[in-house]
Image: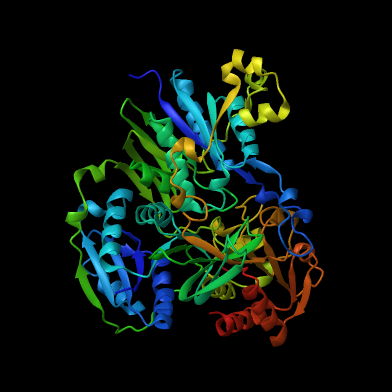
Amino acid sequence: MNNLFVYCEIEDSVVADVSLELLTKGRKLANELGCKLEAIAIDNNISNIGDQIFKYGVDVIHVCDDAKLAPYQTIPHQKIVCDIIRQEQPQIILFGASSVGRDLAPRVASALKCGLTADCTSLKIGDYDEKKTTKNPDTGEITTTVTPYKNLLLQIRPAFGGNIIATIVNLHARPQMATVREGVMKKEVCDENYKGEIKPFDYKKSLSDIDFVVKIISREIEKSKINLKSAPVIVAGGYGVGSKDNFRLLHELAELLGGEVGASRAAVDAGFTEHERQIGQTGVTVRPKLYIACGISGQVQHRAGMQESAIIVSINTDENAPINSIADYVITGDVAEVLPKIIKSYKANSK
Amino acid sequence: MKKGFKIIVLAKQVPDTHNVGKDAMKEDGTMNRAALPAIFNPEDLNALEQALRIKDQFPETTITVLSMGLPKAADVLREAIFRGADNGILLTDRKLGGSDTLATSYAIAQAIKTVGDYDIVMCGRQAIDGDTAQVGPQAAEKLDIPQVTYAEEIVGISDKDITIRRRLEHGVETVNAPFPVLVTVTGTAAPCRSRNAKRVMKFKNAMTSMEIEAANADKALYEARPYLNITTWGADDVDIDAARTGKAGSPTFVKEIQSVVLQAKESKRLTGSDTDINDFVKDIIDNHILG
């Protein structure tokens, strides 16, 4: 009881990356709390769900496997998730901040009258002292009471357009609920041989015909397309990367940071990478939170496609490369030497 | 076929966080809210446009714009009326202050119930001051009606239901939902039309009772032209339970606020040395640039 839950987002019987990332984080938080990690899996043809997610350290999977439940629909999933929560009383439940999670989680929170924090960029376990000051109306005496709360989920997120970072806690209502965007947490198998328990949930009791009033008429889901526009981090390469081979380093760093690989026109023309990755006036315009330009001189056409990025890093052997004038960090050096160092350092310093 | 629908558009007045100037942060690192202009939440304008398109096709449609906020949020109601909405309702009360999304959705749902008869509630997917995208779905749950989020275009409408194309992160989905329904509209939907000059002339003096009082305006005018009155409701007008609103009704607490130091574009110059690279990586991790 009072365990940590993750709602698994599933498309065509496959658990989404964002959910695997949450399971990875959830396992670590559950260890800190000394509780179990449990998952909710609602879809069709998911008899292999254990093979998909036990290795992330999942102790229990609550499964609802039925053709009626796929693809995702708001009300049926909401009713089932609410009933599982009522039955299992988790202390925390996490959702992906995707078009599914952001559709479902608020509705669940509303039905259970719980607090929900959207798009967390960090989750921690910590304490909070609630201070309350009361004034005795007769004597005028002021008393301050402090109620300590232990082991709360600290939900950390940017607010006001990223100008402040707020730490949110839910003191009373349970479960504590949060959503996290894809790529924010790392996906990491905890133990290939980890074995948990599969518990089918009797979802038929939760549903009635009226819950299926919204009809899906058509769906076109594109799989694993290069999605530069929504990538929070872009590692982009130019002619200065030198070779197709060296581009692998960019992919390695991008994957580590939960981002995508982009390119300048010169790199695309040189055949280092595919055309879909081209950023600039004739390519895609991006504004990620972090843009790492590797061996890109920064012609105005390229800058037009990325200059609104929040933080720009330029790695270039030429310390006077034009892109350096709009960069927040200028690292003077060879991409092939600098990138492995960043990868190594990030692995050592990240959570 | 019906000649019109009853639509409620939810609109929020928000600080313009996307255009944060140099003076937006005070020297002590706190937000200088006065320096941020208050604007019509952008995606709520996309929602208004979708409602107006239904009205274009079915002229007997009525569009009521509802905003919860400070008294000055009457500005967004006027703006919506200038662009084609029929009337505005301002839900404002100190008791509602400090509400998180759960308490806000409760108050808004109460106001929608007070309006009573409606086919569609439309709002932006999210507001730029919080980017939570929660209030729409939470209000739908409280009203016990279906929701269609991430709507990009209305592709069909009948007496009983509406067909909507949704823009998801990995594709598109078309769904059909019966009335009443709550629809949240994304910023990729059609932009809102501009003000209509005739409507600006007709409604430029539209005000809430508080504004009429404050401006010492000619009350006879507002009696003679009732359409110039923007309805104002307080918590009691929409039967709000005090325990479910404001701070009391908000399960989430802000434990602490850290301001993000806005850096001028003066680049940090680093070499490729191990120490420099390490410092750089720690910098981007510590400053919440990642994630």
A201 or A344, nearer to the observer = A201
Q: In the depicted view, which residue is nearer to us: B66 or B45?
A: B66
Q: Is residue A329 above or below residue A76?
A: below
Q: Name the image quarter holding the N terminus of chain B.
A: top left
Q: Position of A88 compared to B10: left or right? A: left
Q: Percent x, y for residue B148?
A: 39, 43
Quarter of the image for residue A274 reads bottom right
Q: In the figure, B141 relative to B254: above or below?
A: above
Tell me the quarter of the picture where residue A331 sits: bottom right
The residue lying toward the viewer, choosing from B125 and A187, is B125
B261 sits left or right of A4 in the view: right
Residue B195, above or below A202: above
Tell which residue pokes out farthest to the front in this image. Answer: A138
Q: Residue furthest top?
A: B224
Q: Residue at x 37, y 48 (%)?
A: A220
Residue displayed at 41% across by 54% down: A106
Residue B245 drawn at (x, y percent) = 48, 50
User: Where residue A176 appears, x then y in whole percent?
Assistant: 42, 66
